[in-house]
Amino acid sequence: MSIRQAMLAILEQGPMYGYQLRAEFEQRTGETWPLNIGQVYTTLTRLERDGLVEVVGHGGADDGEEAASDRQHVSYRATEAGRSEVSMWFATPVPRSQPPRDELAIKLALAVTLPGVEVAGIIQRQRSATMSSLQDYTRLKRSGRAAAPQEPADLAWSLVLDALVFDAEAEVRWLDHCEARLRRAALDRSDVRRDAPAASTTEGITR
Amino acid sequence: MNAVVHLAAVSRVHGEGATEVHALRSVTFRAHPGELVAVMGPSGSGKSTLLTLAGGLDAPTTGSVWIEGTDLASLDNAGRARMRRTSVGYVFQDFNLIPALTAAENVALPRELDGEKGKVARRLALTALEEVGIADLADRFPDEMSGGQQQRVAIARAIVGERRLILADEPTGALDTDTGEEILRLLRARCDAGAAGVMVTHEARHAAWADRVVFLRDGVVVDETGADEPEALLAGEAGR
Protein backbone atom coordinates (compact mmCIF):
# COMPACT_ATOMS: atom_id res chain seq x y z
CA MET A 1 0.00 0.00 0.00
CA SER A 2 1.16 3.52 -0.69
CA ILE A 3 1.37 5.45 2.55
CA ARG A 4 1.89 8.70 0.67
CA GLN A 5 -1.71 9.89 0.87
CA ALA A 6 -2.15 8.64 4.42
CA MET A 7 0.85 10.68 5.56
CA LEU A 8 -0.31 13.69 3.63
CA ALA A 9 -3.77 13.43 5.20
CA ILE A 10 -2.26 13.47 8.70
CA LEU A 11 0.03 16.38 7.82
CA GLU A 12 -2.97 18.39 6.72
CA GLN A 13 -3.86 18.69 10.41
CA GLY A 14 -0.72 20.71 11.13
CA PRO A 15 3.06 20.67 10.83
CA MET A 16 4.85 17.62 12.17
CA TYR A 17 8.19 15.89 12.41
CA GLY A 18 8.66 12.51 10.83
CA TYR A 19 8.54 10.73 14.19
CA GLN A 20 5.32 12.48 15.16
CA LEU A 21 3.84 11.59 11.82
CA ARG A 22 4.66 7.95 12.31
CA ALA A 23 3.23 7.96 15.84
CA GLU A 24 -0.01 9.57 14.62
CA PHE A 25 -0.32 6.96 11.87
CA GLU A 26 0.27 4.04 14.19
CA GLN A 27 -2.04 5.32 16.88
CA ARG A 28 -4.90 5.17 14.39
CA THR A 29 -4.04 1.83 12.85
CA GLY A 30 -2.50 -0.11 15.73
CA GLU A 31 0.76 -1.67 14.74
CA THR A 32 -0.90 -3.43 11.88
CA TRP A 33 1.24 -1.78 9.23
CA PRO A 34 4.38 -0.64 11.04
CA LEU A 35 6.24 2.17 9.32
CA ASN A 36 9.96 2.38 9.53
CA ILE A 37 11.24 5.88 10.00
CA GLY A 38 13.43 5.70 6.90
CA GLN A 39 10.32 5.04 4.83
CA VAL A 40 8.63 8.05 6.44
CA TYR A 41 11.49 10.39 5.53
CA THR A 42 11.87 8.99 2.02
CA THR A 43 8.18 9.60 1.46
CA LEU A 44 8.40 13.12 2.92
CA THR A 45 11.32 13.91 0.61
CA ARG A 46 9.31 12.77 -2.40
CA LEU A 47 6.25 14.70 -1.27
CA GLU A 48 8.43 17.79 -0.93
CA ARG A 49 9.93 17.22 -4.39
CA ASP A 50 6.40 17.02 -5.81
CA GLY A 51 5.38 20.23 -4.09
CA LEU A 52 2.80 18.58 -1.83
CA VAL A 53 4.55 19.36 1.44
CA GLU A 54 6.98 22.06 2.50
CA VAL A 55 9.46 22.50 5.28
CA VAL A 56 8.17 24.92 7.90
CA GLY A 57 11.28 25.24 9.94
CA HIS A 58 13.74 23.62 12.16
CA GLY A 59 12.24 23.38 15.57
CA GLY A 60 11.85 21.00 18.43
CA ALA A 61 12.87 20.75 22.04
CA ASP A 62 16.61 20.93 21.41
CA ASP A 63 16.77 23.66 18.84
CA GLY A 64 20.55 23.72 18.55
CA GLU A 65 22.69 24.27 15.49
CA GLU A 66 23.44 20.61 14.99
CA ALA A 67 19.74 19.79 15.33
CA ALA A 68 18.92 22.27 12.60
CA SER A 69 20.96 20.30 10.12
CA ASP A 70 19.33 17.07 11.22
CA ARG A 71 16.28 16.34 9.13
CA GLN A 72 14.69 14.52 12.04
CA HIS A 73 14.09 17.94 13.51
CA VAL A 74 12.51 19.37 10.43
CA SER A 75 8.78 20.00 10.47
CA TYR A 76 6.68 19.52 7.37
CA ARG A 77 3.27 20.80 6.46
CA ALA A 78 0.92 20.21 3.54
CA THR A 79 0.90 22.78 0.74
CA GLU A 80 -2.21 23.94 -1.06
CA ALA A 81 -1.53 21.27 -3.73
CA GLY A 82 -1.06 18.71 -0.94
CA ARG A 83 -4.40 19.62 0.58
CA SER A 84 -6.24 19.18 -2.68
CA GLU A 85 -4.50 15.81 -3.17
CA VAL A 86 -5.88 14.73 0.21
CA SER A 87 -9.42 15.83 -0.73
CA MET A 88 -9.09 13.89 -3.97
CA TRP A 89 -7.92 10.82 -2.07
CA PHE A 90 -10.87 10.87 0.32
CA ALA A 91 -13.29 11.55 -2.55
CA THR A 92 -12.04 8.71 -4.76
CA PRO A 93 -12.85 5.05 -4.06
CA VAL A 94 -9.91 2.71 -3.64
CA PRO A 95 -9.75 0.91 -7.00
CA ARG A 96 -10.40 -2.83 -7.13
CA SER A 97 -9.69 -3.01 -10.83
CA GLN A 98 -6.24 -4.34 -10.13
CA PRO A 99 -6.68 -7.01 -7.45
CA PRO A 100 -3.69 -7.17 -5.15
CA ARG A 101 -1.62 -10.25 -5.81
CA ASP A 102 -3.19 -12.95 -3.70
CA GLU A 103 -0.62 -15.60 -2.91
CA LEU A 104 -3.21 -18.02 -1.58
CA ALA A 105 -5.42 -17.80 -4.68
CA ILE A 106 -2.36 -18.26 -6.86
CA LYS A 107 -1.17 -21.20 -4.79
CA LEU A 108 -4.54 -22.95 -5.01
CA ALA A 109 -4.88 -22.24 -8.73
CA LEU A 110 -1.53 -23.91 -9.27
CA ALA A 111 -2.23 -26.76 -6.86
CA VAL A 112 -5.45 -27.59 -8.69
CA THR A 113 -3.79 -27.66 -12.10
CA LEU A 114 -0.41 -29.24 -11.35
CA PRO A 115 -0.09 -33.00 -10.91
CA GLY A 116 0.87 -34.51 -7.58
CA VAL A 117 -0.22 -31.66 -5.30
CA GLU A 118 -2.55 -32.56 -2.46
CA VAL A 119 -5.04 -29.70 -2.59
CA ALA A 120 -7.25 -30.85 0.31
CA GLY A 121 -4.27 -30.73 2.65
CA ILE A 122 -3.33 -27.24 1.52
CA ILE A 123 -6.87 -26.02 2.14
CA GLN A 124 -7.07 -27.62 5.57
CA ARG A 125 -3.72 -26.29 6.73
CA GLN A 126 -4.49 -22.81 5.46
CA ARG A 127 -7.89 -22.81 7.13
CA SER A 128 -6.36 -23.75 10.47
CA ALA A 129 -3.72 -21.05 10.13
CA THR A 130 -6.24 -18.39 9.12
CA MET A 131 -8.57 -19.49 11.91
CA SER A 132 -5.74 -19.08 14.41
CA SER A 133 -5.12 -15.54 13.16
CA LEU A 134 -8.82 -14.86 13.43
CA GLN A 135 -8.73 -16.05 17.05
CA ASP A 136 -5.81 -13.70 17.71
CA TYR A 137 -7.60 -10.69 16.21
CA THR A 138 -10.69 -11.55 18.22
CA ARG A 139 -8.62 -11.72 21.38
CA LEU A 140 -7.23 -8.25 20.62
CA LYS A 141 -10.75 -7.04 19.96
CA ARG A 142 -12.11 -8.15 23.29
CA SER A 143 -9.24 -6.83 25.38
CA GLY A 144 -7.13 -3.70 25.35
CA ARG A 145 -8.01 -0.32 23.95
CA ALA A 146 -10.05 -1.70 21.05
CA ALA A 147 -12.53 -3.40 23.43
CA ALA A 148 -13.97 -0.19 24.88
CA PRO A 149 -12.86 2.65 22.63
CA GLN A 150 -12.52 5.94 24.53
CA GLU A 151 -10.95 8.11 21.88
CA PRO A 152 -11.37 8.42 18.12
CA ALA A 153 -7.99 6.74 17.61
CA ASP A 154 -9.12 3.73 19.67
CA LEU A 155 -12.27 3.48 17.60
CA ALA A 156 -10.16 3.73 14.44
CA TRP A 157 -7.94 0.89 15.65
CA SER A 158 -10.91 -1.29 16.53
CA LEU A 159 -12.30 -0.72 13.02
CA VAL A 160 -8.94 -1.72 11.54
CA LEU A 161 -9.14 -4.88 13.66
CA ASP A 162 -12.64 -5.51 12.32
CA ALA A 163 -11.25 -5.19 8.79
CA LEU A 164 -8.69 -7.89 9.60
CA VAL A 165 -11.43 -10.04 11.14
CA PHE A 166 -13.75 -9.76 8.15
CA ASP A 167 -10.85 -10.36 5.79
CA ALA A 168 -9.77 -13.55 7.59
CA GLU A 169 -13.39 -14.66 7.78
CA ALA A 170 -13.77 -14.18 4.04
CA GLU A 171 -10.68 -16.29 3.47
CA VAL A 172 -12.05 -19.13 5.61
CA ARG A 173 -15.37 -18.96 3.76
CA TRP A 174 -13.60 -19.03 0.42
CA LEU A 175 -11.55 -22.05 1.54
CA ASP A 176 -14.75 -23.85 2.61
CA HIS A 177 -16.19 -23.04 -0.78
CA CYS A 178 -13.09 -24.32 -2.62
CA GLU A 179 -13.17 -27.51 -0.61
CA ALA A 180 -16.85 -28.13 -1.35
CA ARG A 181 -16.42 -27.43 -5.06
CA LEU A 182 -13.36 -29.62 -5.40
CA ARG A 183 -15.11 -32.49 -3.65
CA ARG A 184 -18.10 -32.10 -5.94
CA ALA A 185 -15.83 -32.03 -8.96
CA ALA A 186 -14.07 -35.19 -7.73
CA LEU A 187 -17.44 -36.92 -7.24
CA ASP A 188 -18.55 -35.91 -10.73
CA ARG A 189 -15.37 -37.31 -12.19
CA SER A 190 -15.76 -40.64 -10.40
CA ASP A 191 -19.39 -40.79 -11.55
CA VAL A 192 -18.29 -40.29 -15.13
CA ARG A 193 -15.75 -43.03 -14.77
CA ARG A 194 -18.23 -45.42 -13.20
CA ASP A 195 -20.83 -44.69 -15.85
CA ALA A 196 -18.42 -44.74 -18.74
CA PRO A 197 -18.78 -48.42 -19.73
CA ALA A 198 -22.59 -48.22 -19.72
CA ALA A 199 -23.14 -44.76 -21.12
CA SER A 200 -21.67 -44.10 -24.51
CA THR A 201 -22.92 -40.50 -24.45
CA THR A 202 -22.11 -37.73 -22.00
CA GLU A 203 -25.13 -38.44 -19.80
CA GLY A 204 -22.93 -39.37 -16.88
CA ILE A 205 -21.59 -35.84 -16.63
CA THR A 206 -24.99 -34.30 -16.13
CA ARG A 207 -25.65 -36.26 -12.95
CA MET B 1 -7.49 -30.83 34.60
CA ASN B 2 -10.53 -33.06 34.31
CA ALA B 3 -12.75 -32.42 31.34
CA VAL B 4 -16.30 -31.29 32.10
CA VAL B 5 -17.43 -33.25 29.07
CA HIS B 6 -15.51 -36.07 27.45
CA LEU B 7 -16.59 -38.00 24.38
CA ALA B 8 -14.42 -41.13 24.16
CA ALA B 9 -14.18 -42.73 20.71
CA VAL B 10 -17.82 -41.97 20.07
CA SER B 11 -19.64 -43.16 16.96
CA ARG B 12 -23.26 -42.55 16.09
CA VAL B 13 -25.02 -44.44 13.32
CA HIS B 14 -28.54 -43.48 12.24
CA GLY B 15 -30.63 -46.09 10.44
CA GLU B 16 -29.29 -49.37 9.23
CA GLY B 17 -28.51 -51.32 6.08
CA ALA B 18 -28.66 -49.37 2.87
CA THR B 19 -29.87 -46.17 4.57
CA GLU B 20 -27.23 -46.30 7.29
CA VAL B 21 -25.69 -42.91 8.03
CA HIS B 22 -22.52 -42.52 10.04
CA ALA B 23 -23.04 -39.18 11.72
CA LEU B 24 -19.91 -39.49 13.86
CA ARG B 25 -17.03 -41.91 13.47
CA SER B 26 -14.93 -42.60 16.53
CA VAL B 27 -14.67 -39.00 17.66
CA THR B 28 -12.82 -38.12 20.82
CA PHE B 29 -13.57 -34.69 22.21
CA ARG B 30 -13.07 -32.86 25.47
CA ALA B 31 -14.01 -29.50 26.91
CA HIS B 32 -12.31 -28.36 30.10
CA PRO B 33 -13.34 -25.87 32.78
CA GLY B 34 -12.66 -22.34 31.57
CA GLU B 35 -12.59 -23.37 27.96
CA LEU B 36 -14.84 -22.39 25.07
CA VAL B 37 -14.58 -24.82 22.16
CA ALA B 38 -16.11 -24.10 18.76
CA VAL B 39 -17.17 -26.89 16.43
CA MET B 40 -17.22 -26.09 12.75
CA GLY B 41 -17.92 -28.07 9.63
CA PRO B 42 -20.20 -28.21 6.60
CA SER B 43 -23.79 -29.35 7.03
CA GLY B 44 -23.95 -33.08 7.57
CA SER B 45 -20.49 -33.14 9.11
CA GLY B 46 -21.81 -34.27 12.50
CA LYS B 47 -21.68 -30.97 14.43
CA SER B 48 -25.18 -31.16 15.84
CA THR B 49 -24.85 -34.87 16.61
CA LEU B 50 -21.75 -34.09 18.63
CA LEU B 51 -23.65 -31.47 20.60
CA THR B 52 -26.67 -33.67 21.33
CA LEU B 53 -24.37 -36.50 22.47
CA ALA B 54 -22.36 -34.12 24.65
CA GLY B 55 -25.56 -33.02 26.35
CA GLY B 56 -26.90 -36.52 26.89
CA LEU B 57 -29.89 -35.85 24.63
CA ASP B 58 -28.91 -38.84 22.51
CA ALA B 59 -26.73 -41.88 23.18
CA PRO B 60 -23.76 -43.01 21.08
CA THR B 61 -23.85 -46.24 19.06
CA THR B 62 -20.37 -47.06 20.36
CA GLY B 63 -18.01 -45.23 22.65
CA SER B 64 -18.88 -43.36 25.85
CA VAL B 65 -19.85 -39.89 26.99
CA TRP B 66 -18.68 -38.60 30.36
CA ILE B 67 -20.03 -35.50 32.06
CA GLU B 68 -18.17 -34.30 35.15
CA GLY B 69 -16.55 -37.71 35.50
CA THR B 70 -19.77 -39.75 35.19
CA ASP B 71 -20.31 -42.15 32.32
CA LEU B 72 -23.81 -41.36 31.07
CA ALA B 73 -24.31 -45.03 30.16
CA SER B 74 -24.07 -45.88 33.86
CA LEU B 75 -27.14 -43.74 34.62
CA ASP B 76 -30.77 -44.70 34.16
CA ASN B 77 -33.16 -42.39 32.33
CA ALA B 78 -34.03 -40.44 35.47
CA GLY B 79 -30.36 -40.06 36.34
CA ARG B 80 -29.53 -38.81 32.86
CA ALA B 81 -32.41 -36.34 32.97
CA ARG B 82 -31.19 -35.04 36.31
CA MET B 83 -27.65 -34.74 34.95
CA ARG B 84 -29.00 -32.72 32.01
CA ARG B 85 -30.92 -30.40 34.30
CA THR B 86 -28.19 -29.84 36.86
CA SER B 87 -24.97 -29.89 34.86
CA VAL B 88 -25.84 -28.92 31.32
CA GLY B 89 -27.25 -25.70 29.90
CA TYR B 90 -28.45 -25.37 26.32
CA VAL B 91 -28.64 -22.34 24.08
CA PHE B 92 -30.32 -22.67 20.71
CA GLN B 93 -30.46 -20.50 17.62
CA ASP B 94 -34.19 -19.82 18.05
CA PHE B 95 -33.97 -19.22 21.84
CA ASN B 96 -36.66 -21.87 22.67
CA LEU B 97 -38.25 -19.83 25.42
CA ILE B 98 -41.72 -20.74 26.63
CA PRO B 99 -43.94 -17.89 25.39
CA ALA B 100 -46.45 -18.13 28.26
CA LEU B 101 -43.77 -17.65 30.92
CA THR B 102 -41.95 -14.47 31.87
CA ALA B 103 -38.17 -14.19 31.56
CA ALA B 104 -37.71 -15.02 35.24
CA GLU B 105 -40.12 -17.97 35.03
CA ASN B 106 -38.35 -19.35 31.97
CA VAL B 107 -35.03 -19.16 33.77
CA ALA B 108 -36.40 -20.59 37.02
CA LEU B 109 -38.07 -23.53 35.29
CA PRO B 110 -35.12 -25.96 35.19
CA ARG B 111 -34.49 -25.32 38.90
CA GLU B 112 -38.13 -25.88 39.77
CA LEU B 113 -38.18 -29.09 37.72
CA ASP B 114 -35.24 -30.12 39.80
CA GLY B 115 -37.30 -29.76 42.98
CA GLU B 116 -36.15 -26.31 44.08
CA LYS B 117 -38.78 -24.27 45.91
CA GLY B 118 -40.40 -21.55 43.82
CA LYS B 119 -38.95 -18.71 45.88
CA VAL B 120 -35.43 -20.09 45.78
CA ALA B 121 -35.71 -20.81 42.06
CA ARG B 122 -36.84 -17.25 41.38
CA ARG B 123 -33.97 -15.83 43.38
CA LEU B 124 -31.50 -17.96 41.39
CA ALA B 125 -33.22 -16.87 38.19
CA LEU B 126 -32.88 -13.19 39.07
CA THR B 127 -29.19 -13.67 39.82
CA ALA B 128 -28.70 -15.33 36.43
CA LEU B 129 -30.64 -12.57 34.66
CA GLU B 130 -28.53 -9.99 36.40
CA GLU B 131 -25.42 -11.77 35.24
CA VAL B 132 -26.50 -11.47 31.61
CA GLY B 133 -27.42 -7.83 32.13
CA ILE B 134 -31.22 -7.89 31.93
CA ALA B 135 -32.40 -8.05 35.54
CA ASP B 136 -34.84 -5.25 34.69
CA LEU B 137 -36.65 -7.43 32.15
CA ALA B 138 -37.41 -10.25 34.59
CA ASP B 139 -41.19 -9.91 34.36
CA ARG B 140 -41.45 -9.46 30.61
CA PHE B 141 -42.76 -12.15 28.30
CA PRO B 142 -40.59 -13.34 25.39
CA ASP B 143 -42.68 -11.53 22.77
CA GLU B 144 -42.08 -8.26 24.63
CA MET B 145 -38.34 -8.58 24.11
CA SER B 146 -35.90 -8.19 21.20
CA GLY B 147 -34.07 -11.20 19.78
CA GLY B 148 -30.91 -10.24 21.61
CA GLN B 149 -32.76 -9.93 24.91
CA GLN B 150 -34.48 -13.29 24.39
CA GLN B 151 -31.13 -14.92 23.74
CA ARG B 152 -29.84 -13.39 26.97
CA VAL B 153 -32.76 -15.00 28.79
CA ALA B 154 -31.86 -18.30 27.14
CA ILE B 155 -28.28 -17.93 28.34
CA ALA B 156 -29.48 -17.09 31.85
CA ARG B 157 -31.57 -20.26 31.72
CA ALA B 158 -28.49 -22.20 30.58
CA ILE B 159 -26.32 -20.97 33.45
CA VAL B 160 -28.82 -20.79 36.31
CA GLY B 161 -27.72 -22.83 39.32
CA GLU B 162 -24.03 -22.81 38.45
CA ARG B 163 -24.14 -25.34 35.68
CA ARG B 164 -20.68 -26.02 34.36
CA LEU B 165 -21.35 -27.18 30.81
CA ILE B 166 -22.94 -24.85 28.30
CA LEU B 167 -23.85 -26.21 24.88
CA ALA B 168 -24.77 -23.70 22.22
CA ASP B 169 -26.09 -24.49 18.76
CA GLU B 170 -25.62 -21.50 16.42
CA PRO B 171 -26.46 -19.14 19.33
CA THR B 172 -25.96 -16.02 17.21
CA GLY B 173 -27.66 -17.33 14.09
CA ALA B 174 -30.79 -15.23 14.38
CA LEU B 175 -29.10 -12.05 15.58
CA ASP B 176 -27.45 -9.08 13.89
CA THR B 177 -23.68 -8.64 14.08
CA ASP B 178 -23.50 -6.41 17.16
CA THR B 179 -26.11 -8.31 19.16
CA GLY B 180 -24.44 -11.57 18.19
CA GLU B 181 -21.15 -10.28 19.54
CA GLU B 182 -22.76 -9.36 22.84
CA ILE B 183 -24.01 -12.94 23.15
CA LEU B 184 -20.54 -14.30 22.37
CA ARG B 185 -19.11 -11.95 24.97
CA LEU B 186 -21.49 -13.43 27.55
CA LEU B 187 -20.65 -17.02 26.67
CA ARG B 188 -16.99 -16.11 26.74
CA ALA B 189 -17.33 -14.45 30.15
CA ARG B 190 -19.12 -17.49 31.53
CA CYS B 191 -16.33 -19.77 30.33
CA ASP B 192 -13.68 -17.39 31.66
CA ALA B 193 -15.48 -17.75 35.00
CA GLY B 194 -14.92 -21.51 34.94
CA ALA B 195 -17.64 -23.15 32.85
CA ALA B 196 -16.89 -25.31 29.83
CA GLY B 197 -18.59 -24.20 26.63
CA VAL B 198 -19.16 -26.01 23.37
CA MET B 199 -20.52 -23.93 20.52
CA VAL B 200 -21.54 -25.17 17.11
CA THR B 201 -21.27 -22.49 14.45
CA HIS B 202 -20.66 -22.20 10.74
CA GLU B 203 -19.31 -18.65 11.07
CA ALA B 204 -15.55 -18.40 11.39
CA ARG B 205 -15.90 -14.94 12.93
CA HIS B 206 -17.91 -16.39 15.80
CA ALA B 207 -15.78 -19.51 16.18
CA ALA B 208 -12.84 -17.15 16.67
CA TRP B 209 -14.15 -16.30 20.15
CA ALA B 210 -13.30 -19.84 21.21
CA ASP B 211 -10.04 -21.09 22.69
CA ARG B 212 -10.11 -24.07 20.40
CA VAL B 213 -11.77 -24.69 17.06
CA VAL B 214 -12.53 -28.25 16.03
CA PHE B 215 -13.25 -28.96 12.37
CA LEU B 216 -15.54 -31.87 11.56
CA ARG B 217 -16.07 -33.44 8.17
CA ASP B 218 -18.05 -36.59 7.40
CA GLY B 219 -18.23 -37.38 11.09
CA VAL B 220 -14.49 -37.18 11.67
CA VAL B 221 -12.38 -34.51 13.38
CA VAL B 222 -10.12 -33.38 10.56
CA ASP B 223 -8.35 -30.57 12.32
CA GLU B 224 -8.13 -28.49 15.42
CA THR B 225 -6.66 -25.09 16.15
CA GLY B 226 -5.54 -24.33 19.66
CA ALA B 227 -4.64 -21.15 21.43
CA ASP B 228 -0.92 -21.81 21.26
CA GLU B 229 1.49 -18.93 20.99
CA PRO B 230 -0.93 -16.31 19.72
CA GLU B 231 1.75 -13.61 19.57
CA ALA B 232 3.92 -15.66 17.25
CA LEU B 233 0.96 -16.26 14.96
CA LEU B 234 0.07 -12.62 14.96
CA ALA B 235 3.60 -11.60 14.08
CA GLY B 236 3.48 -14.03 11.18
CA GLU B 237 0.23 -12.54 9.99
CA ALA B 238 1.49 -8.96 10.21
CA GLY B 239 4.43 -9.81 8.00
CA ARG B 240 2.28 -11.35 5.31
Image: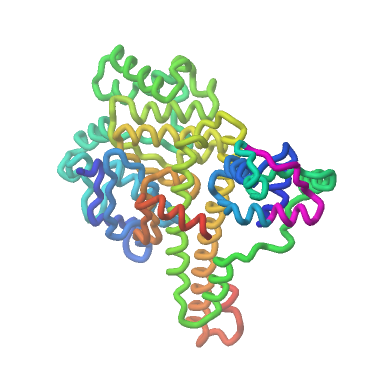
User: In the rendered view, does A145 fall on the left or right side of B24?
Assistant: right
What is the x, y in percent for residue A122?
A: 46, 68
Left or right position of B114 against B192: left
Q: Is residue B99 above or below residue B20?
A: above
Report the front residue among A24 and B26. A24
Query: Image check: A67 left or right of B105?
Result: right
Question: Considering only vertical position in the picture, is B228 above or below A113?
Answer: above
Residue for point 47% across, 24% down: B99
Residue A54 magenta-highlighted: yes
Q: Which residues are magenta?
A: A43-60
Q: Nearer the viewer, residue B104 or B226?
A: B226
User: Residue B190's spot in the image, x, y percent?
Assistant: 36, 32
Q: In the rendered structure, does residue A53 fall within the stretch colored magenta?
A: yes
Residue B187, quarter of the rendered image: top left
Front residue of A80 and A91: A80
Nearest the camera: B152 or B111? B152
